[in-house]
Image (tube, helix red, strand yellow):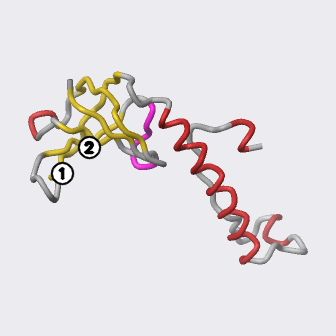
Amino acid sequence: FVEEIEFDRLGAFTFSPEEDTPASEMPDQIDEEIKEARLDRLMRAQQAISLKRNQLRVGTVEKVLIESVEYDAESGEPIGIGRSCQEAPDTDGEIRVYGADENDIGSFITVRLTEADVYDLMGVKL
């Protein structure tokens, strides 16, 4: 199903019985090892889909809200860390923006996306 639908993003977790719920009392509970194996298989499938979906965005121009700035370990150059309207705060990947600096924090800037990985995108400030 996941490979057919190709979700842009997918979060998942194993079942955890909640005290005093019908599900926690059901017989034949699945072993933790099996749950973890199933979750791993699901998330590996989703990683390939996520990379493919992110790669489709490379070359596009998007508005990105810059939330913070980090510095490249090798060059010392500032890199803005932000998200577009497609990334939910605190749960989805981030967009790393070369050419953004502290003056851009809290602002929407125009970015051309240049690279993609499984969860994150990279781009340059226009």
Magenta stretch in the rendered image: 86-91
- Residues at discs 2 and 1 in contact (Cβ within 8 Å): yes
Give the left or right position of residue 21, taking residue 84 as reference: right
Image: 108 above or below 6 = above
Q: Dot 1 corresponds to which residue?
A: 70
Residue in the image at 30% along x and 26% along y: 112
Secondary structure, mark 1, is strand
Residue 96 versus residue 58: which sits nearer the camera? 58
Report crowding for label 2: few under 14, some 14 to 19, many 20 or more residues within 10 A (C-alpha): many
Residue 101 versus residue 73: which sits nearer the camera? 73
Residue 80 versus residue 58: which sits nearer the camera? 58
User: What whole-number distance in Å separates the C-alpha atoms at marks 2 and 1?
Assistant: 7 Å
Q: Dot 2 corresponds to which residue?
A: 81
Report crowding for label 1: few under 14, some 14 to 19, many 20 or more residues within 10 A (C-alpha): some
Q: Quadrant of residue 121?
A: top left
Give the left or right position of residue 111, taking residue 76 as reference: right
Residue in the image at 23% along x and 26% along y: 109
Secondary structure mostly taken by the magenta-highlighted segment of the chain: loop
